[in-house]
Image: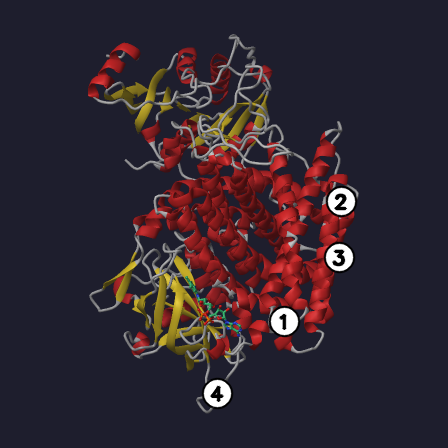
Amino acid sequence: MVRRAHHERVLMTSPNPPEMRTTVDFFLHHWLNIDSLTSRSRFEDHSRETFSAVLDTAEQIAADKYAPFNREVDNEEPRTETNQDGTLRVVLPRATHEAWAAYAGSGMLAAAQDYDLGGMQLPYVVEAAANMFFSRASISISWALLTTGNANAIMAHGTPAQKEVFAKNEFAGRWAGTMCLSEPQAGSSLSDIATRAVLDDENDSLGPRYRLFGNKTWISGGEHDVTENIVHLVLAKIPDENGKLVPGTRGISLFIVPKFLPLPVGEVARAFSPARDAGAGEGKTAVDKDSNVAFPHRHSVPPLPEGEGKTRNDVVLAGLNHKLGWRGTPNTLLNFGEGKFKPLGNAGAIGYLVGKPGDGLRCMFHMMNEARIGIGLAATMLGMAGYEASLQYAKDRKQGRPITGGSTSSPRAEKNAEQPPVALIEHADIKRMLLAQKSYCEGAMALLLYCAKLVDETHTGAEASAAEAKLLLEVLTPIAKSWPSENCLEANSLAIQIHGGYGYTRDFPVEQYWRDNRLNMIHEGTHGIQAMDLLGRKVVMEGGKGLTLLATKINDTIQKAFHIPELAEHAQSLARALQHVGAATKSAWSTGNPNEALANAVPYMQAFGHMVLAWVWLDVALALVHEARVDTRADQQVVGAGLTALSESADEARLIPAFAGTRLPADGGSFRDGKLAACRYFFAYEVPKIEAWLAVVKTRDMTCANISADAL
Amino acid sequence: MKVLVPVKRVVDYNVKVRVKADNSGVDIANVKMSMNPFCEIAVEEAVRLKEKGAATEIIAVSAGVAQCQETLRNAMAIGADRGILIETDVELQPLAVAKLLKAVVDREQPQLVILGKQAIDDDANQTGQMLAALLGWGQATFASKVEIEGNTAKVTCEVDGGLETISVKLPAIITTDLRLNEPRYATLPNIMKAKKKQLDTLKPADLGVDVTPRLTTLKVEEPPKRKGGVKVADVAALIDKLKNEAKVI
Ligand SMILES: Cc1cc2nc3c(=O)[nH]c(=O)nc-3n(C[C@H](O)[C@H](O)[C@H](O)COP(=O)(O)OP(=O)(O)OC[C@H]3O[C@@H](n4cnc5c(N)ncnc54)[C@H](O)[C@@H]3O)c2cc1C
């Protein structure tokens, strides 16, 4: 009998204390004061209650349908079987299908959309927070975020018919989406893509119709039967009048290439012809009669033609990549237009142009902030999962004895072999590794939720604060993606270390977290590419406007922290770090030679990221210290702590007392102690690295850049 | 047919509860609270009855502190049509809850009341039975299958050593066991819909019920810690220990 794991667990004690949720709630409601968003018209139906209910649902589905199967999807790596027609199909564990069904069924795919699209107009910051629970439970079992990203791009740049047919079916979870950028010869350098798109019919009802020919690789979720159709968003080049592909990124356009054509094209044409207004829809059109073309009722989505009529597009699976981790998600090589199928009588994958020709990269990267925050959160949650596992292990495993003896006159360490061994967590070095993980992962979580709230600000804030949020995101997004990818991966390494030899086996989950996390420095712009984006573009654009704004924000926090005795020293270190970063940015570019400036872009990004995280931790600490003070007063007052005050009008801040309903857990203060210790750890052990990283940036050290290939 | 579903707000099943320092009870300050899982099953069953056309309206009712509203919203997100909160800060014991529910039944006249067989906080397993007695209705407890056939409910009940299928005349009380169904998740669109559903608040006095506790809690203690095991040399030693130390054989 299949029952929900959660109800089974009613009868047992849980191995999983709701610690992360407490932290999430603290960051969202207390530190970021997201409840103030409910004063905006888009979110006016919302309340703290609805936000919490969403997180509850996410937590529950993640616990029931994701977490128990994380190892299974790793063991049962996707494999292919051959269909009767000679094409390959991908075989996935049943758990993958069920996880998708639960996720899609919950409405998560459409969470941020308008009500009439089946959405709940959820702020992005809450959507991102909800997705954290899925990432922590099993990062690879579902590739739902790709579908959301794909549908969002279509919503932003597609025609009404494209939104109706493709985006809507994706939000409903019936179809899944992919992002097809990479090709074997074009990874980091997308300007080198060679997939061609040749015009087929300018006037197709689903947009100008092209035929695509080329090969894509690395495509996540590129083939599977979890959903009835797959919507590929493909970058390709339209040849010029001489039949040549334009070099550079300017020639790149974006196309929707569905695995199955949605309807015999004629029918789509009828369903969406502008002439077909309400009441005119006679006969068997797939669209509801009294719906408007833009967004008819939820149930009127044109269904795929059944059976015979299902037109297979000329895009086929060429094979799978066999990966180190993230194995639950099939990663595919796709061939477009090899002639395996002849949709509408001809070879060539049918693709509908999205946006204007040549505008492909812009359309694809429209939601870049969200995509990169999503990767950062994935890295962070893998880090969290490792932290939680190693914390538990350190409490359970007994090994070694405490150090005793010694005095100032005769310093030496002794151990009493008669004593029983203690739990690992009693050892200082184990605690160091736990605190390191905590400071990386919770710090990264705070940063990402902060960035997610900035995304909401760009969409719903007043003009000035939206512009400010946009600018801040320009500078922070490379950090939001890269910092967790590197440091929460290091956290996973420490989680293995805490497990000793056991951590190196597949009997414990931590090795998988590390393998899964290793991807995040590679996809969605490699570490090196992100660093060049940061130092080469983001901090210098518009005369350094973004960096200046960030510095102002950091200074606000520093000013506040200066007045708090226990934080004043941290404030000073942060001020120094900020100065160093500013100076290094100048020195790097002082010769105006980009080869010199960018030779050490990665150390620069590492230092920059650490400065940002130090800022975040100091601000979180500020909120906690404020709380301590407010707690001692009878009437709780509104205290705008550091970042929370950002881009919120005074009115909004007044609407909801910052601490209304958000009390720290009654755990004898250990919640607060833990956060403040993580902050101290970061300042004591991590912040000093900043100067070291920046040294080579400042001197424009060319040791690496100048070494010849022969000498390596 | 109207169905009444009482739902209880309890400490989340994930929380490791602690006993208060003065042994007066369990510390529930600031811990995560959720709907009692057996109550979730009750709501789900009512929603299924409605989907099958056997029920027309589902009323969720909860007695307790103001935050029980969240539990009611959750029930409405699963599919209850409206909610009634009987708000009180007084510690509620099963008899008081049963009396409150009786008063609600008198007002609402449901044909069926589906309750969880017990709540995971106190594990009392009493409210449904007491309510049946107060109403003079038939009861089918520990249900793992429910079918409505005209004026009766055919209910499969979990009993020691097996299953027993009984038929009860409506109106009746049903209490749910774990195997009855797998509750659906509160989906995002339904969370929003639940927000707009009607939620009435009453006080025990409005219902003429005195909820003063009848039982006094003397002391609450943690269960004794499990003692570490020992390795025995052979089967003989094991049998010796079981006989003479544990005295179980
Ligand atoms: C598991 C997985 C899933 C993926 N999913 C998708 C997907 O769904 N869709 C999709 O389109 N792609 C996807 N990718 C592809 C991914 O985005 C690319 O792997 C990535 O962009 C890097 O490209 P590459 O692998 O060709 O490496 P390369 O570009 O060859 O880079 C190799 C190394 O060289 C460095 N490098 C490259 N160029 C420069 C330069 N100019 N200066 C300095 N250093 C440089 C890089 O930083 C990197 O360290 C996925 C990849 C993986 C591994």
Residues at marks 2 and 4 touching, judged by CB atoms closer than 8 Å: no
- The Cα atoms of the two marked residues, 2 and 4, are separated by 62 Å
Image height check: is A303 above or below A101?
below
Q: Which residue is mark 1?
A: A701
Label 3: chain letter: A
- What distance separates the C-alpha of mark 4 from that of mark 1? 43 Å
Which disc is residue A240 wearing? 4
Q: Confirm whether circles 4 and 1 share one chain.
A: yes
Residue A173 numbered mark, or none: none
Of residues B78 and B17, the one nearer the viewer is: B17
Q: Residue at x 41, y 67 (%)?
A: A232
Residues under labels 3 and 2: Cα distance? 18 Å
Q: Is mark 1 within 8 Å of ligand 1?
A: no
Q: Hey, which residue is sitting farthest bottom in the picture?
A: A242
Return the chain for callout 2. Answer: A
Q: Earlier in the sequence, mark 4 or mark 3?
A: 4
Residue A439 in the figure: left or right of residue A626: left
Q: What separation in Å lies between label 3 and label 1 (alpha carbons)?
A: 29 Å
